[in-house]
Amino acid sequence: MPKLTEREHLADLEARQTKIADQIVNARRAVRDKYASLMGELAVECLTEREFRDILSQAIRAGGPASVTALKALPSPPG
């Protein structure tokens, strides 16, 4: 196989970078779609849209394990 010139090598690397960036976008979209489908199983209608966004934003900011630990420490709702 002939050796690539610096310009050809750069073009090849840029093409790979673009392909990887597209794969990242697609993988992120797939994960988000999977999590979004879980919302249909939850009673989110009892929250306002702002409450829902705030809960998710804070849980994501804190991280999964910390959020679960904090929520488990809350008292159970009455009835």
Image (cartoon, rainbow, N blue to C red):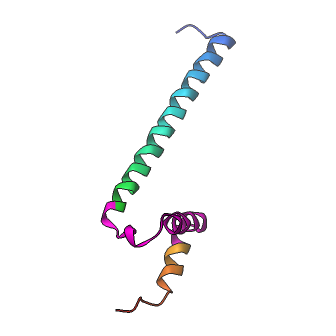
Q: Position of residue 55 (x, y in %)?
A: 53, 69
What's the magenta bit mostly, secondary-structure-wise? helix
Instruction: Say whether residue 32 is left or right of residue 21.
Output: left
Instruction: Say whether residue 70 is left or right of residue 5.
Output: left
Q: Position of residue 29 (x, y in %)?
A: 44, 44
Residue farthest along the left direction in this orientation: 41
Residue farthest along the top direction in this orientation: 2
Residue 52 sits above or below residue 15 on the image: below
Q: Position of residue 4 (x, y in %)?
A: 61, 11
Could you say which is closer to the camera, residue 51 or residue 14? 51
In the image, which residues are magenta? 40-65
Could you say which is closer to the camera, residue 3 or residue 69? 69
Q: Where the C terminus falls, by quadrant?
A: bottom left
Could you say which is closer to the camera, residue 23 or residue 57? 57
Q: Position of residue 32 (x, y in %)?
A: 44, 51
Residue at (39, 68) in percent of width and height = 44
Residue 18 sits above or below residue 58 on the image: above
Residue at (49, 75) in percent of width and height = 68
Residue at (65, 18) in percent of width and height = 10
Residue at (52, 33) in percent of width and height = 20
Q: Is residue 41 magenta?
A: yes
